[in-house]
Amino acid sequence: MTPREQEIQARSIRAETRVTKAVFPPTTNHHNTLFGGTALAWMDEVSFITATRFCRLPLVTVSSERIDFNHPIPAGSIVELIGRVVKVGRTSLKVDVEVFVESMHADGRERAITGAFNFVAVDDAQRPIPVLPDFA
């Protein structure tokens, strides 16, 4: 394993981000389930925090990839969002986010949503810069 690969592995482990939220009525739709736009905003925030923890540089979200809504998330649920860096380029990185749902009154949880977000590190002029300057 190269020194860059070792650094990526170590930073990826440290960057993993977990956020837990409760699904309350202001975040639900007419089906009394979590509104998709709210879920996407939460996922983008978790992915941004994960990417920032990885490189500690200014970042911009440049795209999101396929978002799969596999299971509805009812009001009154607990959700856990987990962000992990899965790919590192020269100036960019990709973060996968999984969203798990669990009842407040029963054990067990289920993966409800998955998605990926792509970021680019930028300088003050918004130009791309290396995410690992010491390994550029």
Image (cartoon, helix red, strand yellow):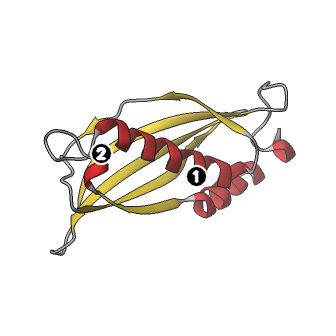
Residue 126 sits above or below residue 48 on the image: above
Sequence-first tag of 2 and 1:
1
Q: Residue at x 72, y 55 (%)?
A: 7
Residue 70 sits above or below residue 3 on the image: above
Q: Is 53 situated left or right of 132 in this image?
A: left
Q: Which residue is drawn at 52% across and 59% down?
A: 17
Quadrant containing the N terminus in the rendered view:
bottom right
Q: Which residue is drawn at 16% across and 38% down?
A: 30
Q: How many labels does the image show?
A: 2
Q: Where is residue 42 in the image (x, y as percent from the top left)?
A: 44, 47
Spatial CA distance of label 2 from label 1 is: 17 Å
Residue 77 sits above or below residue 73 on the image: below
Q: Name the residue under label 2.
A: 113
Q: Where is residue 49 in the image (x, y as percent from the top left)?
A: 59, 51
Q: Is 83 situated left or right of 6 in this image?
A: left
Q: Where is residue 29 in the image (x, y as percent from the top left)?
A: 22, 40
As helix, strand or loop, the secondary structure at mark 2 comes to strand
Give the crowd class for mark 1: few <14, some 14-19, many >=20 residues within 10 Å. many
Q: Mark 1 points at which residue?
A: 50
